[in-house]
Amino acid sequence: MTIEIRPITRAEATDYLRVMPWANGFPQEEPEPSAWYAGRAANPPQHKATPEQLDRYADELLTEWFRPQAAFVDGRIAGGSAIVSVEITLPGGRQVPMGGVTSTGVLPTYRRRGLLRKIMAAMLDDCRERGEFLAGLSASEATIYGRYGFAPATFQHRWEVRRTDVAFRTPFTDPGQLELVDGAEAAVVWPVLHEQIRAVRVGEVSPLPGKWSGLTDATLPADGTGPAHHLIHRSAAGEVDGAAIFRLPWSPDPDYAGELQVEAFEALNHDAYRALWGLLLDFDLTKRVVAARRPVDEPLRWMLTNPRALKLARTRDNLWLNILDVQRALEARTYAATDVLVLEVAGVSWRLEAAPDGAACTAAPGAAADISLTVNELGSLYLGGVRATEFRDAGRLVEHTVGAVSRLDALLRPDRAPHNAVGF
């Protein structure tokens, strides 16, 4: 058996696509309701791609931002994955390039042969060559990607609330205006709104080209989820400062009838946030709201007279990070305090001099480490979404200097939990 790992040519693009689970109609997610999906099914409907669809996708495939690698076994493509060029926002507001791992699959008849490991090594080498010191992905299965250096860095909630349980603690008079718009207008609003959001949100990711182009499609989905409705909020000055996408799917089951599903929601300020949720949680002829892709520190709960009304349906990891260059990564972000720590990462010691206005990170061979950890733990800690004390108590890092772990938490803590509503 001869194995070759390399990028694909245009002539090989259709064969590359055929090994992807989504093109074969194979499962792409574990069989549990995902936190990113507001529907009731364990997985959204999946359909095998037609030859015409594969040809169209192949024409769009080879771009400067999509960098595929394929595993050829005896000359036949048996697996593949790709890196997409995106940006991620770090603590301090800096937006840096990140290699996003996507479109990963190995044919069932070729699994357990080390193909994915070889593909991943080629892609991460490509990231390093291009100067990307971070790589990220969204894991379909939680047990796969830790072996390649990735670890959960952001998390999201899926929650639901009964309409009859909703009452806000304080009255509210909206100084702006809510408006239902069509998909064409929403497709113009969302890119602008997202750019404003990701400028200040730690962990947010830049969208892939064409992310919102599908919002112009007003046809009724064949899967019964119902058409998308687009809600925007304008400030008193007439500027769009919030938006939501929701569905009202029909259901033959009375238990699920009258459910409003929120697929996307963003607000730049309190007025937009309060006005949008005020309507969505009290929409006529509905009885339940299910919201997906929500940040773990959602403030809505604390705006209700009964905080128990907001019930968590699921929490799951979202963005997984891999720190490809420890020095560059630690110097790229800012910190919430001023301190100096020696971190031993995968056997290499680094002296981190951190401060709110930046940091210096230098190799420190022979220096006594304050904390020892692997690149996996560093990936989870990097944006501040996981606390170092959690890893210490779980036995996943070693504290050599008393109090060093608490000091590291104080350095890494962001004002808000890292969150990315956009994936790749």
Image (cartoon, rainbow, N blue to C red):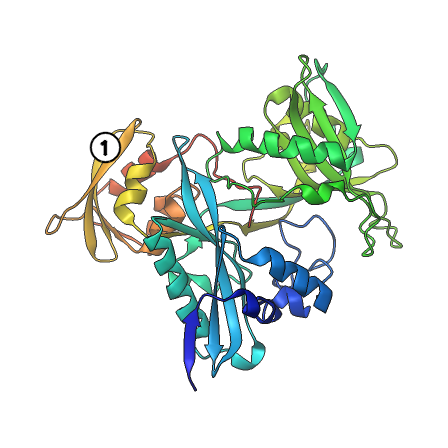
Give the position of the N terminus as an image quadrant.
bottom left
Image location (x, y in percent) of residue 124: 38, 59
The residue that label 1 is drawn on is 339
Image location (x, y in percent) of residue 23: 65, 66
Q: List the single residue furthest toward the front.
A: 11
Image location (x, y in percent) of residue 316: 55, 51
Residue at the location (55% across, 64% down)? 10
How many circles with numbers are drawn on the protein? Answer: 1
Along the viewing direction, whichever of 124 and 68 lies nearer the viewer = 68
Q: Which of the 4 image quadrants contains residue 184?
A: top right
Under tag 1, what secondary structure? strand
213 vs 61, left or right, is: right
171 vs 120, left or right, is: right
Q: List the single residue furthest toward the left.
A: 366
The reply to whether residue 259 is visible in this rendering is yes
412 vs 313, left or right, is: left
Along the viewing direction, whichever of 100 and 178 lies nearer the viewer = 100
Is disc 1 surrounded by few (<14), some (14 to 19) or many (20+) residues within 10 Å? Answer: some
The reply to whether residue 48 is visible in this rendering is no
Q: Which of the 4 image quadrants contains residue 127?
A: bottom left
Q: Amino acid at mark 1?
A: Asp
